[in-house]
Amino acid sequence: LKAKSSAVSPRALMVNTLLLFGSPGRPLTPLSVLSLSLFGSALGFKSYLWFATIGYTVAVGLISLVALIVYNILPSDPTTRLANLQSLLVLAWSVRLTAFLLYREYIAWPSLHRKSKEVNEESHDESKLGVWMCCGAFYAAMAAPCCYRLQAGLDDKNGSGKWGFIGKYGIFMQFIGLIFE
């Protein structure tokens, strides 16, 4: 009896380690989404108020960017166009809102930046850690639908899970909201 060769290529090992044990069939796991969210929202350690502003937009944008990359590069058959469009619109919203929040804090409203510095000096590391963990989990839950929709497009090889009217209307409203915002 010959044993099956289960050699793992160095590239696959590196990719799976970076994705926190994801696989080409399921590139993002809930743990990897939470890790990306915690990484993005860690900007709150620079300024306490950024946990709820800049950290929020960066965390959601980072998750959608990584999801777009891994759901279209790792699998042999990329996910659907509408799922990619939804995640791309979330990424565009994130970039736009991050730029606006940075502009508001540093250029348009300098008193907010001074107040933010005061709040940051008065806050303790323990409270920052608690807020970071709560915000990270909350932002991961907010961005999870993009990942679920990309995964559904990947799992749907026979076309049974098509986007219905409500899904397409939701993408349309997302686009309109991005323009009006």
Image (spheres, grey):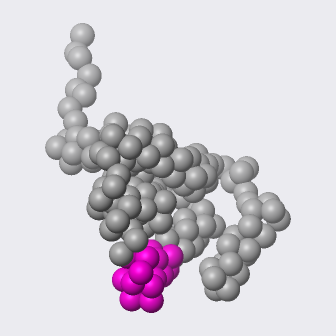
Main secondary structure along the magenta-highlighted residues: helix
Residue for point 33% across, 60% down: 120
Q: Which residues make up the magenta segment?
A: 96-113
Is 51 within the magenta?
no
Above or below 173: residue 78 = above
Q: Is residue 81 above or below residue 140?
A: below
Percent position (x, y) of residue 169?
78, 70
In the current view of this chain or complex, which residue is farthest to the left? 10
- Where residue 136 sits in the image (x, y, percent)? 45, 48
Among the 4 quarters of the image, the one containing residue 167: bottom right
Which quarter of the rendered picture does the C terminus lie within?
Answer: bottom right
> Which residue is at the front of the view, 167 or 106?
106
Point out residue 60 in the picture as x, y percentages from the top left corner: 48, 60
- Residue displayed at 30% across by 45% down: 125
Report the residue that reaches farthest toward the bottom: 108
In this picture, residue 135 sits left or right of residue 35: right
Residue 57 vs 172, above or below: the answer is: above
Q: Is residue 102 above or below residue 63?
A: below
* Residue drawn at the location 47% of the way across and 65% of the way down: 53
Q: Position of residue 55 (x, y in %)?
A: 41, 61
